[in-house]
Every structure is written in structure tokens, then in C-alpha cells.
């Protein structure tokens, strides 16, 4: 916060203070730094802004930092729908979203994401209306990457799939709600995710019933169990 308020004069004061510190001894060694900090703190003030819909209902409530050059959004931010239900809660750092951002629907938490100065970077969680996790993922520099977990409303794992550059790319595994493996394979991209390489299908007891070879989404059965026709595929 201090750095953003430094004018050439403040920077010069820091330099002067440091030179003074080199010459001073004992309790006077921090005088220059203390004076500079007081100047930095004095050059800013914060206030809360509230906007409203044309019908009068509250729309946004947020904090701004006021400087000699204008205002910049800095601090807590909340947004509401016309009924008054919370839509968004986040934090700004000098005009950019920084930290946890929460999105709501009818006042119920739907997702949480982590931002680093506007960019997606860190955990992402989507929720069912009862608060159970629907999806767990991670972002790195604005890109969803790594293993993504999808869940049934019961909270049981439904799918694990690997992402690269915001798209399914790599191993995946689907599950029945009883926890048994339903399908296992690898995704590639061709106008969307397609199976590529070996694809295995299982029954609800976890027994292998069919093996296929896939070439960019075109799959051919290379082995199947006699009861494979009973599969719900």
C-alpha cells in the first residue's frame, strides 16, 4: 500500500531519511523512516460507496481509496440483486480483485475462487445449494490445470479428470455413486474432449465389461464380457 502512494517527494524523503540514519546513532536511527511512513499514510484516505438500482434497492457497497489523483476501489466489495440477496463478495487491492471471491445465487453460495490481482490463481470450488461440493479445481495464471474433481449431490466422487490450459487433457476416471469405477480412459481435444487410446468400461460392481481402442473419439471394442449388453451405456 505504501509503494503506490510514493511521489518523487516521498521517495526523496526516504532517501534523505536513509542518509540521516547512516549518520545518526542510537535512538535517532529510525527518525527518517518514521517521518516517511507518516507522510505515506497521510496521503490516502478511504471511504465507503453505496450504489442503488433505479428502484432504490441497494446494488453495490464497496470501499475506495481516495488520493490526490482520484479514487480507486480498495477493500471490501459486495453486490446485491434487486431483492436484496447477496450476489458477490470479494476484496479489491488498488483496483483489482485480490484474494477470495464468492458468488451467490438467491443468497446461497455457489462458487469460491481465488484471484491474484484479477487473475485466477489458486483453488476453485463450486457448490450445490445445500453447501455440498459440486466441483473442485485449481487455477494457475488464469488457466484451470491439474486434476479436477466432480461430485454427486450426495458428496460422493463422480469424476476425476485432468485439465491443461482450461481443457480436459489427460487421464480421467468416472465413478458410480456407490464408489465403484464406471469408466477409465484418456481425453484429448478435438472441438471438445474426446476419448483417445484405451477406454475401459465397468459395471456397478466394479467388474470390467468392455475394453475399447479410441482414435480421437472414434472407439472400437476390442474386448467385452458376455454380459456387457446389460450395461447402461
Image (cartoon, rainbow, N blue to C red):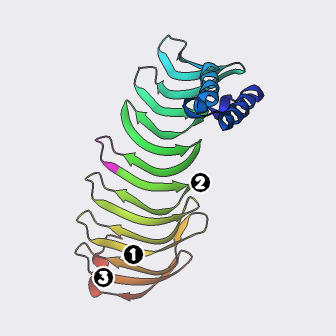
Q: Position of residue 203 (x, y in %)?
A: 27, 75
Task: Tell me the crowding category of disc 3: few under 14, some 14 to 19, or many 20 or more residues within 10 angstroms, Cα based.
Answer: some
* Near-viewer residue (226 or 68): 68
Q: Does the magenta segment cover residue 131?
A: yes
* Near-viewer residue (47 or 211): 47
Q: Does the magenta segment cover residue 82?
A: no
Q: Residue 208 shows which numbered tag?
A: 3
Among the 4 quarters of the image, the one containing residue 117: top right
- Between the residue at mark 3 and the residue at mark 1, the CA separation in whole angstroms equals 10 Å
> Can the viewer see residue 28?
yes
Please name the residue shown 50% across and 27% down the image: 77
Q: Is residue 16 above or below residue 196?
A: above
Please name the residue shown 62% across and 31% down the image: 33
- Between the residue at mark 1 and the residue at mark 2, the CA separation in whole angstroms equals 29 Å
Asked if marks 1 and 2 touch (Cβ < 8 Å), the reply is no
Task: Tell me the crowding category of disc 1: few under 14, some 14 to 19, or many 20 or more residues within 10 angstroms, Cα based.
Answer: many
Task: Tell me the magenta residue range.
Answer: 128-133
Of callouts 1 and 2, the N-terminal one: 2
Q: Is residue 37 above or below residue 119?
A: above
Quadrant showing the C terminus? bottom left
Of callouts 2 and 3, the N-terminal one: 2
- Left/right placement of residue 153 relative to residue 87 reads left
Q: Nearer the viewer, mark 3 or mark 1?
A: 1
- Left/right placement of residue 128 relative to residue 94 reads left
Of callouts 3 and 1, the N-terminal one: 1
Residue position for label 2: 141
Residue position for label 1: 184
Q: Position of residue 201 (x, y in %)?
A: 36, 77
Among the 4 quarters of the image, the one containing residue 8: top right
* Near-viewer residue (175 or 140): 140
Among the 4 quarters of the image, the one containing residue 226: bottom left
Amino acid at each position: 500500500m505504501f509503494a503506490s502512494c510514493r511521489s518523487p517527494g516521498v521517495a526523496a524523503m526516504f532517501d534523505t531519511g536513509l542518509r540521516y540514519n547512516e549518520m545518526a546513532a542510537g535512538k535517532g536511527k529510525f527518525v527518517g523512516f518514521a517521518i516517511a511512513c507518516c507522510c505515506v499514510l497521510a496521503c490516502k484516505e478511504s471511504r465507503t460507496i453505496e450504489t442503488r438500482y433505479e428502484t432504490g434497492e441497494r446494488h453495490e457497497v464497496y470501499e475506495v481509496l481516495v488520493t490526490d489523483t482520484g479514487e480507486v476501489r480498495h477493500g471490501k466489495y459486495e453486490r446485491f440483486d434487486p431483492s436484496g440477496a447477496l450476489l458477490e463478495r470479494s476484496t479489491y487491492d488498488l483496483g483489482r480483485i485480490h484474494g477470495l471471491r464468492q458468488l451467490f445465487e438467491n443468497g446461497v453460495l455457489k462458487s469460491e475462487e481465488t484471484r491474484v490481482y484479477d487473475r485466477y490463481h489458486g483453488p476453485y470450488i463450486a457448490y450445490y445449494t445445500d453447501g455440498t461440493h459440486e466441483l473442485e479445481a485449481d487455477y494457475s495464471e488464469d488457466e484451470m490445470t491439474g486434476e479436477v474433481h466432480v461430485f454427486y449431490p450426495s458428496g460422493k466422487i463422480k469424476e476425476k479428470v485432468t485439465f491443461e490450459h482450461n481443457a480436459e487433457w489427460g487421464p480421467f476416471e468416472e465413478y458410480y455413486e456407490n464408489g465403484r469405477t464406471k469408466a477409465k480412459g484418456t481425453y484429448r481435444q478435438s472441438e471438445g474432449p474426446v476419448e483417445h487410446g484405451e477406454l475401459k468400461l465397468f459395471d456397478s460392481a466394479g467388474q470390467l465389461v468392455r475394453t475399447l481402442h479410441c482414435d480421437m473419439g472414434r472407439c472400437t471394442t476390442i474386448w467385452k464380457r458376455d454380459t456387457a449388453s446389460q450395461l447402461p451405456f
